[in-house]
Amino acid sequence: MQPVKAVMRELKPRAKVLAVAGLDPSGGAGLAADVRTFMALGVYCAPVVAAITSQDTKGVYRVEAVGGELLRAQLEAVLADLRPGWAKVGVLYSPDNMEVVASLLGGAGVKMVLDPVLSAGTGQPLVGPGGLKALRERLLPEAFIITPNAKEAARLSGLKVRDAEDARRAAKALADLGPEGVIVKGGHIAGDQVVDILYYDGGFYEFRRPRVGPDAHGSGCVFSSALTALLALGRPVLAAVEEAGDLAAGAIRWALSVGSGRPVANPGFRLINEAERYAVLREVEEAVKALLSEPGLAYFVPEVGAQLAMALPMPTGPGDVAAVDGRMVRTMDGVRAVGPVRFGASDHMARVVLTAMRHDPSVRAALNLAYRPSLLEALGEMGLKLASFDRRREPPDVAAVEGASLPWGVEEAIRASGGAVPDVIYDLGGHGKEAMIRILGRSAHEVVEKAVRAIRIVRAPGQPI
């Protein structure tokens, strides 16, 4: 048998990258965010300190650049030993440090993703005297791709950036300074959607996604680090930009409240979800098996079929919700699942779960059953909180959007419950819509246990159905 040490020496990371940025002692941005992001994507990161800050989640109070010779020594050591092919570059603060990074990385053939951070999210400057000029003249020409937000793009290009068209002009102007690609991030541009503009290889590309909430501390670092990692892994530029944006959006959606200021972007949500993926699949499979074994279930299965769904702990969309492919349907022999449990199998029930989780992240599962007054009464007798919505009150603009009806209905029921997610949400149907009862809970097993208990109450001797 091969010795353990020999086996370990053969292990190699999928990719090695360099991160050159500032140190944030609160752990939210800079190198701390970079390392967490690279780890979430399975990439090894060598962190090189270029500046030290005094900051917390409320603001930056002091910045000092690491001396140019010390920065050079760090970079030379890492470049000689690890030989990374890509580097994410953030806050360098001083013109001297910008010169060191430009000359060393350029000379070593390391491709650079530059996040030209000019100020903290709370407004404090992160570029010292002469830094803006050095950034434009030394770093931008050496970068493969740069990732300014709208404010940074405006300062670097000298153009106003108020909308997507302005972002296009600024991106082209910045590309003329040397980088092969420019992404102007749209988080600081008003609108219901965030629109990131990429100029690359002579063309413009837009990446749109819903605005997930207030920006989180370190979200820009997460985006640029994720982009660097994905490019180092060999992803094509367009695919890497889109995936990095999705990761950053999820990191904002599941930001951590660690202090009394802004929440901290959380790229680790991806690791947690991946760790839980198999467990969620097994949980739904076992819960479905328990539900299908319950005598008398068929009477409570809707005409459209029953569905059981459960989300990962930090979902980013319907693809992170496991459900029965094809639903559970009535047959001559009872009720059966049409297909296996898989992620992304149900858009409708996923929207119910995802809407509930926006109000209470612990409510991760839901089951729909046919509306039966006796079943609703039994659920009430169990002490569960019931709430409903009236489809007749659905606004026309909501009804006109595919997939918007159920999120609207769930929101209505939650409002009727005083802002808390109820245990049961029901409606009496409408034109082309079957009346339905939806049971919610923290897990697929919990939801099925509630349903089975209610079914047995209804079907007890002497109880009407």
Image: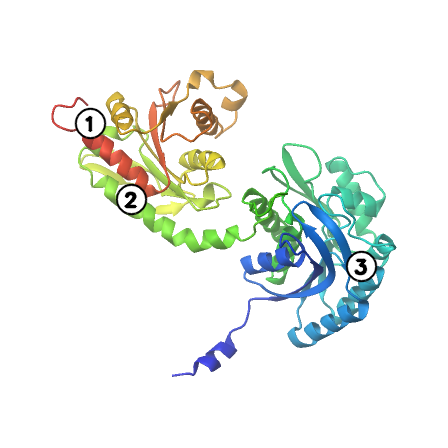
Identify residue type, mark 2: Ala
Residue that protrudes farthest toward the left in the picture: 461
**Identity of the residue drawn at 77% across and 64% down:** 66
Residue 410 showing in the rendered view: yes
Q: Which residue is mark 3?
A: 139
**Residue 247 image offset from top left, x and y in percent:** 57, 49
Q: Earlier in the sequence, mark 1 or mark 2?
A: 2
User: Relative to residue 45, is residue 423 depicted above or below?
Assistant: above
Q: Secondary structure at mark 1?
A: helix
Task: Check contact, mark 1 vs mark 3: CB within 8 A.
Answer: no
Foreground mark, 1 or 3? 1
At mark 3, the secondary structure is helix
Mark 3, Cα crowd under 10 Å, few <14 / some 14-19 / many 20+, is many
Tell me where residue 362 appears, x and y as whole percent. Answer: 42, 41
Q: Are the two marked residues, 1 and 2, in contact with CB atoms closer than 8 angstroms?
A: no
Q: Position of residue 231 (x, y in %)?
A: 63, 59
Label of residue 287 in the image: 2
Q: Label 1 to label 2, Cα distance in Å?
A: 20 Å
State left or right for residue 282 relative to residue 177: left
State the residue position of label 1. Answer: 458
Percent coordinates x, y for residue 426 in the rendering: 36, 25
Q: Amino acid at mark 3?
A: Leu
Q: Are marks 2 and 3 in contact (CB under 8 Å)?
A: no
Which of the two residues, 50 or 144, is positioned nearer the viewer here? 50
Disc 1 marks which amino acid?
A: Val
